[in-house]
Amino acid sequence: MGTAVLAELPTNATPQIDPLDNTTGCCPRFHPVGWDRQSLHFDNKRFVRAITRSKDHVPVDMAEVFGRVFEEMMEEGVFDEAHPFVLSRDLSAEQAEHLFAVDGDVPGEEMVTLSGHYRTRVFDAPYEEAPVLLGGFAHELAKDGEEVGDSYIFYTTCPKCAEAYGHNYMVVVDEVREPDPNAPTAPPIMKM
């Protein structure tokens, strides 16, 4: 299948999402063109970090947490409407981490930065398939000789908008590093 990159973007940039292509009054429609097989490069890219609670990996307070963070981002004028980008990952069955891309600080919220190189793949699948998609893309990158670091998912719309638009696009975003040539490798398997 391969992970050939289709385009390069400037450092800290993500593909644009048209905020006016919005028939739900909630999430803009996501178009995968420009997102699939993309290479992203971050150099101290700023994010607001928020934690949601989950029960068996199902969020229980996501609407409340996302609503609060987005409201604070808007109040501070640090939300980029054309580049809404939230990286999410499960920390455990009871907790998930969400990184909201921002153009400045949000007082009262935990601020973090990401630096590194990332690869993307777009999938149109049910939410419950996310763990399989994460594993499959990491395997694909490893087959191409890239070492995978942290893995995230950019859920492009909320469940109600995914249903309204007829697509549940998720962007898997994996940190990649060149393999360390000095790292010890497993000895070859001996056949008897």
Image (spheres, helix red, strand yellow):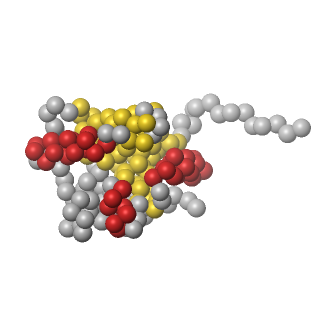
Left or right: residue 113 versus residue 3 is left
Residue at screen point 45% across, 52% down? 127
Q: Residue at x 22, y 45 (%)?
A: 67
Name of the residue lying farthest toward the right? 192
Residue 117 in the image: state x and y as whole percent.
40, 46
Q: Residue at x 16, y 31 (%)?
A: 108
Where residue 92 appears, as percent x and y from the top left, is: 46, 33
For the residue pair 100 and 13, the one nearer the viewer reads as: 100
Residue 91, picture quadrant: top left
Q: Position of residue 77 (x, y in %)?
A: 11, 47
Task: State the image coordinates of residue 178 (x, y, percent, origin top left).
Answer: 50, 43
Question: In this view of the protein, can residue 84 be seen by the observer?
Answer: yes
Residue occupying the point 42% across, 33% down: 94
Along the line of sight, the residue nearer the viewer: 99 or 95? 95
User: In the shown orientation, is residue 125 left or right of residue 109?
Assistant: right
In the picture, measured across the screen, residue 32 lies left or right of residue 48, that is right
Name above or below for residue 34 compared with residue 10.
Answer: below
Q: Quadrant of the C terminus?
A: top right
Determine which quarter of the picture holds residue 90. top left
